[in-house]
Image (spheres, grey):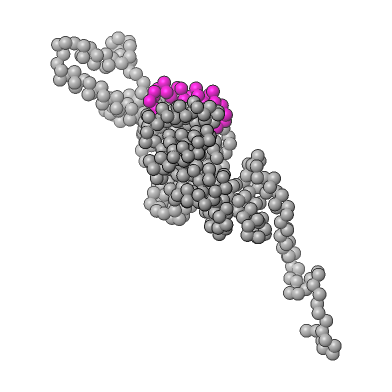
Amino acid sequence: MTSRRLSRLALMLVLGAGLGTLLTGCPGSATKKKVAIRRALPKVERSAKRAFDRGVRELRLARGEREQARARVRARKQFIEAVEIDPRLWEAWHDIGLVDIADGDLPGAATALGKAIAIQPASVPTALTLADVLARLGRYDAARAELERALSAIEAAKPKAKPDSDTGGTGGGDDKDKDAGADPDADPAEVEKARKEAEAEAAREAELQKRAAGGYTEGAVRLRLAALLRDQGKSDAALAEVRKVLRMEPASGAAYVELGLIYYKGGKLDLAALVMRKASVIVPKDPVVWNTLGLVALAQGKDQEAFSHFDAAAALDPQFATARFNKGAVYLDAGDYARAVPELEAASAADPRDASILVALGVAYRGKKKYDEARGAYEKALEVDPRNADALWNLGVLYMDFQDSPAKAREPLERFLKVAPGNHPRRPDAKSRLSEIAPEPAPPTPGAPAPKAGSGPGVKTPKPPKGKKAK
């Protein structure tokens, strides 16, 4: 069980309309002085844009899990048509990547998102989504490069101070406001008007920065970078990123959570508990805080306290499946399948497209000797993620060891060996199992007559009675 389960990538569709002018500003607008950070792109072909819009519409109108799966197939065809007409349509490449993620094709997603970022390197959502995919593929250095790209784009999007032509300094407007406030003879109405104008301008600047960054802040991206470094075991570098965030946002609950996770992974459980208790004061209604407190308590051997924290996380957000999963995983590790099943069923109900929850649920069903339900859970996990190695291995084991169907185990085990990483701990077992399964009969040679029933090597043909000819 990992310290904090990887969240699935959110499908963040990039819509084509208006993206080209997102940061360029309009004549007479408050954003006129801003310089676009997005690369200026030539106009795309109208027919490509129409195909792209059709694809987006397919995804937006789909309702229900099955319809969404069918909609992804149709949408992908439209996005492919769009980039075949005009390969410069980076939004289509981005959304192809998102569809591939939803279908479990991470290598395909990395390729499509890489094409999108090559065309539009200042797209923060694309860089972050690509970073997540690369991390899941184990390409940590490449993922880190994408996070640093996102940070550069956010920095470029920050409002720049306007030089004061009279003084040669910066922030002339702010100085005027200070002078007005310090002048005892200043009209209070004028002072209030200047203050409101300054606040409105600051709000416009903040909104512009937010739109430029796709809604992401520097702090949020740095915390993603810290999490990546933590997963690589680079605790010092991860701590450095968190401290940068805390200097910018001293009351950031998310930063304290990440700090706690770094200490947790480093085995500094007392420090982790201390930091997480501080986080629980800053953001008491954040389920992630209580889930992390549960993980720390569990590592300290305080099982009941851990379960209490997991329950608190689930109560704060019934759709927060991670806490129920962690609780179920503890029961599963202890072999308590009866208690694991309801926890994992609740987690799966809250997040039905999480393949790792479905695999764990299948193991719990298998422990309860509910073999058909176990097979259904593994198969559903493979519908969500066709390349899920754990689901494939468990399905093969179920057929071979529990349902006395070794022939059926061949296909999932062979697929497992194709998709599992080279260091997957189950690879030797899968190879050993395949060597025990009888090889499939060779197909008949083309043109050769098919053997008759009851004939062939090892089959004796009975002799006809005397006086009768064999028919």
Q: Residue visible at 71% across and 56% down?
A: 437
Query: Which residue is nearer to you in this view: 11 or 233?
Result: 233
In the image, is residue 250 part of the stretch drawn in magenta? yes
Left or right placement of residue 395 versus residue 27 in this view:
right
Please provide percent x and percent y for residue 299: 53, 34
- Viewer can see residue 433: yes
Q: Residue visible at 57% across and 29% down?
A: 233
What secondary structure predominates along the stretch shown in magenta? helix
In the image, is residue 140 part of the stretch drawn in magenta? no
Left or right placement of residue 91 versus residue 427 in this view:
left
Instruction: Identify the magenta region.
Output: 230-253
Please provide percent x and percent y for residue 365: 54, 54
Q: Residue visible at 57% across and 44% down?
A: 333
Tell me the quarter of the image containing the N terminus.
top right
- Viewer can see residue 37: no
Is 39 above or below relative to 76? above
Tell me the quarter of the image containing the C terminus.
bottom right
Please provide percent x and percent y for residue 157: 39, 26
Q: Residue visible at 21% across and 20% down?
A: 194
Counting every numbered tag in the picture gives 0
Please provide percent x and percent y for residue 87: 49, 41
